[in-house]
Image: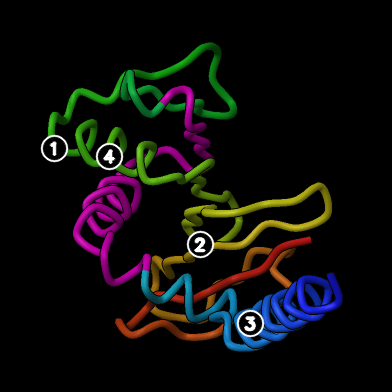
């Protein structure tokens, strides 16, 4: 009986040590975002170029709308259908890969691709439309990603 208890304790301690080491070695949000950015770059670029060329100044595309290729254009009534097939396919794939909201902000040079969020903050990739650092007021942290004009961002 004592041997079984001793083995059980050893197994539990080993599992705790493995869990602590895994947590301490887990990639940071920035590192995870960079990995997703590299994987999704062509899709992100397709959508960013479309929104940059769009005459609309404030656009939101929610994950539920991505499948239908719809975007909410503020200052207008209703939704606008995106007719570009490549953009619609890119949006659909980004939705499948876990992107929640894509926005182009008025009075800002920023297109954001929200990848994760909590009740208090959101984070993902931000694209600078004009080559300057993104200027959206809710951004509290920016770190350059591996391509020019792209950043890891955190909003609150």
- The reply to whether the C-beta atoms of the residues labelled 1 and 2 are less than 8 Å apart is no
| Mark with earlier residue (2, 4) | 4
Q: Disc 1 and disc 2: Cα gap in Å?
A: 22 Å
- How far from the left and from the top, in percent, is residue 71? 43, 27
| Mark with earlier residue (1, 4) | 1
Does the segment drawn in magenta span residue 60? Answer: yes
Q: Disc 3 and disc 2: Cα gap in Å?
A: 41 Å
Q: Going by the picture, which residue comes out furthest to the top?
A: 78
Residue 140 is drawn in which quadrant? bottom right
In the image, which is nearer the foreground, mark 1 or mark 3?
3
Which residue bears the numbered disc 2? Answer: 110
Which residue bears the numbered disc 3? Answer: 18
Which residue bears the numbered disc 1? Answer: 86
Report the magenta stretch's main SS: helix
In the image, which is nearer the foreground, mark 1 or mark 4?
4
Question: Measuring 38% from the left and 29% from the top, which residue is drawn there?
Answer: 66
For the residue labelled by badge 3, is the local secondary structure a helix, a strand or a loop? helix
For the residue labelled by badge 1, is the local secondary structure a helix, a strand or a loop? helix
Does the segment drawn in magenta span residue 32? Answer: no
| Mark with earlier residue (4, 3) | 3
Report the span colored magenta: 36-65
Q: Disc 4 and disc 3: Cα gap in Å?
A: 35 Å
């Amino acid at each position: 009986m004592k041997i079984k208890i001793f083995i059980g304790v050893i197994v539990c301690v080993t599992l705790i040590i493995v869990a602590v080491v895994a947590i301490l070695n887990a990639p940071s949000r920035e590192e995870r975002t960079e990995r997703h950015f590299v994987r999704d770059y062509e899709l992100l670029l397709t959508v960013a170029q479309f929104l940059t060329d769009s005459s609309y100044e404030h656009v939101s595309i929610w994950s539920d709308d991505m499948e239908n290729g719809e975007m909410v254009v503020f200052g207008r009534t209703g939704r606008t259908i995106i007719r570009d097939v490549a953009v619609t396919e890119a949006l659909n794939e980004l939705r499948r890969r876990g992107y929640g909201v894509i926005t182009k902000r008025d009075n800002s040079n920023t297109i954001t691709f929200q990848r994760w969020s909590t009740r208090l903050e959101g984070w993902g990739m931000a694209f600078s439309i004009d080559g300057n650092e993104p200027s959206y007021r809710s951004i509290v942290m920016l770190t350059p990603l591996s391509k020019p004009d792209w950043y890891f961002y955190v909003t609150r």
